[in-house]
Amino acid sequence: MDNQTLFTTIQDLINSQQLAVLCTQKDGHPYASLVAVAATPKLDRIIFLTPKTTRKYDNLTACPNAAFLINNSENRAEDIYQATAVTATGTVIDVPDAEQQALTDIYLARHPHLASFAAADTTALVCVKISRYILVNRFQNVFELAVTP
């Protein structure tokens, strides 16, 4: 699969799914969370909201490395051969004040029902700068896409 087709496949998969599994770790202990995500058009960043009091937020503050798993499985036997999954790996970055609203707008375009959550003082907008995507389809076909800055 060429890079443009791979990019489009990943973009279509991410845009078709509301949720992702976020993987974090702290003190050598892994942790997984279900989060509502949005990606920037270039797929260079994935964003989500979380209360500042959560374990995932604490983990990301201690160790900014993160991974997301996004898939289109439907919990059917056929999924083993028909589902597609993508893992996105990256690092949490600070969002400059000048970019906060633009990223929030991208997020709320996908999740308008979370507008009041986004506006709460206790909610953090978390931005993960993605370095690579690994797409798996048909059970064992693996493709990797590096994200250029």
Image: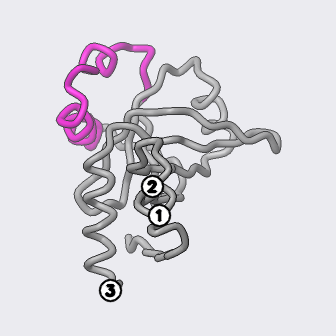
The secondary structure type at the circle numbered 2 is: loop
Q: Residues within 10 Å of mark 2 (few under 14, many from 20)?
A: few
Quadrant in which residue 57 is drawn: top right
Q: Amino acid at mark 3?
A: Asp
User: Is the residue 42 above or below the residue 46 in the image?
Assistant: below
* Residue at x 53% of width, y 21% of height: 52
Query: In the rendered view, does 103 fall on the left or right side of 23?
Result: left
Give the Cα separation between the discs numbered 1 and 2. 6 Å
User: Is the residue 60 above or below the residue 73 in the image?
Assistant: above
Q: Amino acid at mark 2?
A: Glu
Of label 3 and label 2, which has the lower sequence position? 3
Give the Cα separation between the discs numbered 3 and 2. 26 Å
Point out the stretch of residues depicted in magenta.
Answer: 99-124
Q: Position of residue 68 (x, y in %)?
A: 51, 49
Q: Which mark is residue 2?
A: 3
* Residue at x 81% of width, y 40% of height: 27
Q: Which residue is denoted by mark 1 in the rendering? A: 81
Contact, mark 1 vs mark 2 (Cβ under 8 Å): yes
Q: Main secondary structure of the magenta part?
A: helix
Q: Which residue is denoted by mark 2 in the rendering? A: 78
The secondary structure type at the circle numbered 1 is: helix
Q: Position of residue 100 (x, y in %)?
A: 29, 37
Q: Position of residue 63 (x, y in %)?
A: 67, 44
